[in-house]
């Protein structure tokens, strides 16, 4: 087989040399092109030689298909952290994930310095419940190091049957020593958008961009508006994109379009200028111009950054939180023979102002860090209650306030106390709600 291949190779070389000779002095570009092709053929021949040596002389018998798959994946993963080969099973898993249900731990990961790095734990998943955080490094699984493995190989090791325990070793910034975390694998059912009201504001928690996202968002917003008795009783919307690893570009566009009347949402530019695309908003704003605050952090990536960048550039929302992850590239899934696929980075995306966030992320308009929660078991001395004139013995009653006014004041005080409780649980969200209250007050004063 090798002999025939080498003879064919020599025939190709001979043909190439002949063409170069006759074209010399006529078109130097042709000579350069033929020289490049010759180099490619030589490299492919080198691959064939190494492939056959491994098959025939490696200490153990190796599957030819496994060797080819490893070579293909190595070629793709050498390009950037997001290009890779998807074997048939992984390809099927990926298609299932974009539909919103799959088995696993519930973490979005990348690779950095040879280790698996958590981009974000997904809401209400085993990893989230176990306390895994964005930025954690996973260095070992069940006591076996992940150093030296590709990202796909590391992910394969973390996969397993639903209900089975996995122990991952975590390195976290601010903690001196690595520590182990036990997680029970489960079926991951993602609700792309959860809606609720906090006071007079609607909070839309978007945890993923899959096929459910834009329908969930529209239904959730409509439900909260109806429950409030109409849009007139809503002072604004919080889009919570924290720890959202991204997903489908089409859904990021749909979510942005839901709150924009016109203008560009995002553009993509590839290697070929003819492949550049621009996506524009259609008329119609679901919130009818109500103020919007978008929450982001370093776990907000890809599609999340498209939404944040579009609403920020159009001055449609105030961006609050911390700088986002900075994934400004688009991957295309291309099916290949054998029922697998390759994930290939084919373009960069740009916000409406023309900026690329690749490696930079989206910078918030207002930087708000989430305070570290008090460690469990630590007893903190309760603050003394505030004293006022009403606490003094024999103080005069207020004779200018009616019972209705008194009830209204008590109701306002109850709301303020709930807001204070929220600051303890989620400072960034409480800050976002305060912004909406301020914007609503300004709007009322102008009328």
Image (cartoon, rainbow, N blue to C red):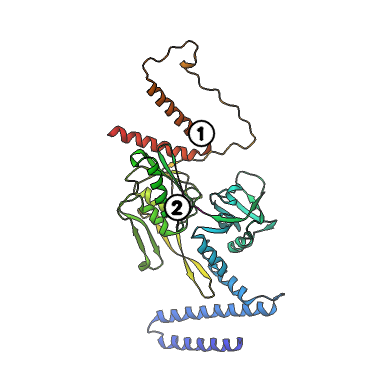
Please tell me whether residue 82 is drawn above or below residue 15 in the rendered image. Answer: above
Residue that numbered label 1 is attached to: 421
- Foreground pick, 223 / 176: 223
Q: Is residue 287 left or right of residue 138?
A: left
Secondary structure of the residue carrying tag 1 is: helix
Identity of the residue drawn at 44% across and 79% down? 33
- Foreground pick, 294 / 351: 294
Identity of the residue drawn at 55% across and 77% down? 43
Identity of the residue drawn at 58% across and 61% down? 151
Place of residue 371 in the rendered image (x, y in percent of width and height, measured from the top left) = 53, 38
Q: CA distance from mark 1 to mark 2?
A: 28 Å
Q: Is residue 189 left or right of residue 330?
A: right
Does residue 204 show up?
yes
Mark 2 crowdedness (10 Å alpha carbons): few <14, some 14-19, many ≥20: many
Residue placed farthest to the right in the image? 59
Identity of the residue drawn at 36% across and 40% down? 229
Residue that numbered label 2 is attached to: 304
Please tell me whether residue 38 is drawn above or below residue 405 in the rendered image. Answer: below
Q: Which residues are magenta?
A: 190-195
Count the marks: how many?
2
């Amino acid at each position: 087989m090798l002999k025939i291949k080498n003879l064919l190779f020599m025939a190709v070389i001979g043909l190439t040399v002949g063409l170069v000779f006759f074209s010399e002095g006529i078109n130097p570009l042709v000579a350069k092109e033929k020289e490049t092709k010759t180099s490619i053929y030589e490299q492919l021949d080198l691959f064939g030689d190494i492939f056959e040596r491994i098959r025939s002389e490696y200490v153990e018998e190796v599957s030819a298909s496994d060797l080819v798959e490893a070579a293909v994946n190595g070629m793709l993963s050498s390009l950037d952290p997001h290009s890779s080969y998807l074997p048939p099973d992984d390809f099927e898993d990926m298609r299932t994930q974009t539909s919103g249900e799959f088995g696993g731990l519930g973490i979005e990961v990348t690779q950095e310095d040879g280790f698996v790095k958590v981009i974000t734990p997904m809401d209400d998943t085993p990893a989230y419940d176990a306390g895994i955080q964005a930025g954690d490094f996973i260095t070992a699984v069940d006591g076996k190091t992940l150093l030296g493995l590709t990202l796909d190989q590391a992910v394969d090791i973390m996969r397993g049957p639903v209900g089975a325990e996995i122990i991952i070793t975590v390195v976290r910034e601010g903690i001196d020593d690595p520590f182990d975390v036990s997680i029970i694998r489960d079926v991951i059912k993602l609700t792309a958008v959860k809606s609720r009201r906090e006071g007079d504001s609607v909070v839309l928690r978007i945890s993923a961009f899959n096929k459910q996202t834009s329908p969930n968002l529209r239904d959730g917003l409509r439900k909260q508006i109806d429950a409030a008795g109409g849009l007139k009783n809503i002072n604004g919307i919080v889009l919570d994109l924290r720890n959202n690893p991204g997903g489908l570009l089409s859904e990021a566009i749909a979510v942005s379009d839901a709150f924009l009347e016109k203008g560009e949402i995002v553009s993509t530019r590839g290697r070929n200028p003819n492949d550049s695309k621009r996506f524009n908003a259609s008329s119609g704003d679901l919130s009818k111009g109500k103020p919007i605050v978008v929450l982001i952090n370093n776990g907000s990536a890809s599609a999340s950054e498209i939404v944040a960048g579009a609403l920020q550039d159009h001055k449609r929302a105030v961006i609050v939180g911390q700088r986002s992850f900075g994934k400004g590239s688009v991957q295309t899934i291309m099916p290949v023979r054998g029922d697998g696929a390759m994930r290939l980075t084919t373009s960069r995306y740009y916000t409406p102002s023309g900026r690329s966030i690749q490696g930079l992320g989206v910078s918030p308009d207002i930087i708000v860090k989430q305070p570290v929660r008090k460690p469990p078991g630590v007893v903190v001395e309760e603050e003394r209650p505030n004293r006022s004139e009403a606490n003094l013995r024999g103080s005069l009653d207020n004779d200018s306030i009616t019972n209705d006014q008194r009830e209204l004041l008590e109701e306002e005080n109850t709301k303020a106390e709930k807001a204070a409780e929220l600051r303890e649980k989620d400072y960034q969200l409480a800050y976002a709600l305060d912004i909406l209250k301020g914007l609503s007050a300004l709007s009322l004063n102008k009328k």
